[in-house]
Image: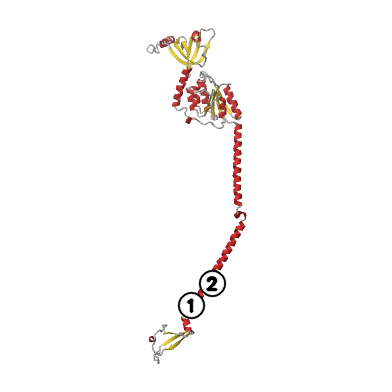
Amino acid sequence: MANASSPEAPLPVGKVSALIGGWVDRLGEVWVEGQIAQLNRRPGAGMVFLTLRDPERDVSLTVTCFRQVFEQVADAVQEGARVIVRAKPEWYAARGTLSLRASELRLVGLGELLARLEQLKRRLFAEGLFEDARKKRLPFLPGCVGLVTGRGSAAERDVLENARRRWPAVRFEVRNVPVQGPQAVGQVCAAVRELDALPEVEVIVVARGGGSVEDLLPFSDEELVRTVAAARTPVVSAIGHEPDQPLLDFVADFRASTPTDAAKRVVPDVGEELTRVRQLRDQARRTVLHRVERESAGLAAVRSRPALAAPGEAVAARGAEVEALLERARRVLGHRLDHAQTDLGHALARVEALSPLATLRRGYAVLQKADGTVLTDPGEVADGEALRARVAGGSFGVRAETGGPSGD
């Protein structure tokens, strides 16, 4: 085609459309799986028109089939159902549109759906999206709760009424979206991202009532699971009833068994909290009173001791002891002084008895030379030498005579 055309010789639109049709015809029949986004059955018309959508890539194709082909599964097929179609691509050259002409329609079996969900679950689990370590704690008392649910649904009513009954002051940011069908995944994801971006929203609840496995398929979609995993705001999953477990339950920060249970989990009960506050206040009062009573009893026990009950008696008793000790000290000291005086008198008497003066009093005299030397030998003095004689009453001078009759 590129070789057969140029700015000077462009191909007509019809020719290009015919060439595309030729290439499409060469494709042959294919088996296609998708979700029915739209279903158009006109009364009396021989053709049925469907829009087959790929929910993971948001791509759609038009499918046409004869009524007798569609009638084989008409009772079980509805919008939102997953089907497998055997079809041949057709190019409508006049309008330049592509469609699939279906020759057979099959519903995707429940067992096959569950097997695919289990495979997706294992893959997401291996990535760590379901680990408890990444789950965020729910706030104790959120000021604003985000709610993603169907418009006018029982799930919306259950969450709003039960939450406001428990805590009347709670505020909600509600986003009403389809909760089943081909548009559900995209709009639920958009609502979660929008609420996650609001700083006042402290927790997000994704709620829906019960349903079949096919009805709950949007809440097992990989895009929704990854959107919830990436949210900074804690997310509560409240899908269906207790037995229902879409993949959203595993990635959410908290799984509620029902929408009513979600309301009980995201806000506390004002009556229960008032009762708890009252109980804690009573407990604190009892603790304080017990502590005061214990300390008062200890203070009374201390004050009842003699030292504090009659402190003057202890001082008086100690004063008497001090007086007694003082008197005893006086007596001991007096006795010691008397004994020492007696000993001193005896020692003085002995000293006086042994004193040279006592000898002199008995009539003896001491002779000293002029230089004070005491004479003890007559040979130490010369005849006529002046001496000094000391007696008890004093001293006087004498002169020595060495030639006497006795020779003394």
Q: Is residue 60 above or below residue 130?
A: above
Q: Is residue 30 above or below residue 317?
A: above
Q: Is residue 210 above or below residue 134?
A: above
Q: Which residue is mark 1?
A: 350
Q: Quadrant where the N terminus lies? A: top left
Residue at 45% over, 24% down: 122
Residue at 54% over, 68% down: 333
Q: Does residue 10 appear in the picture of this structure?
A: no
Q: Of residues 6 and 257, which is closer to you in this image? A: 257
In screen coordinates, is 3 left or right of 290? left
Q: CA distance from mark 2 to mark 1?
A: 18 Å
- Describe the element under mark 2 as helix, strand or loop: helix
Q: Position of residue 78 (x, y in %)?
A: 52, 14
Disc number placed over residue 338 in the picture, else none: 2
Q: Which residue type carries mark 1?
A: Arg
Q: Of residues 291 and 24, which is closer to you in this image? A: 291
Q: Quadrant where the C terminus lies? A: bottom left
Q: Are marks 2 and 1 in contact (CB under 8 Å)?
A: no
Q: Position of residue 370 (x, y in %)?
A: 42, 85
Q: Position of residue 196 (x, y in %)?
A: 52, 27
- Describe the element under mark 1 as helix, strand or loop: helix
Disc number placed over residue 307 in the picture, else none: none
Q: Which residue type carries mark 2?
A: Asp
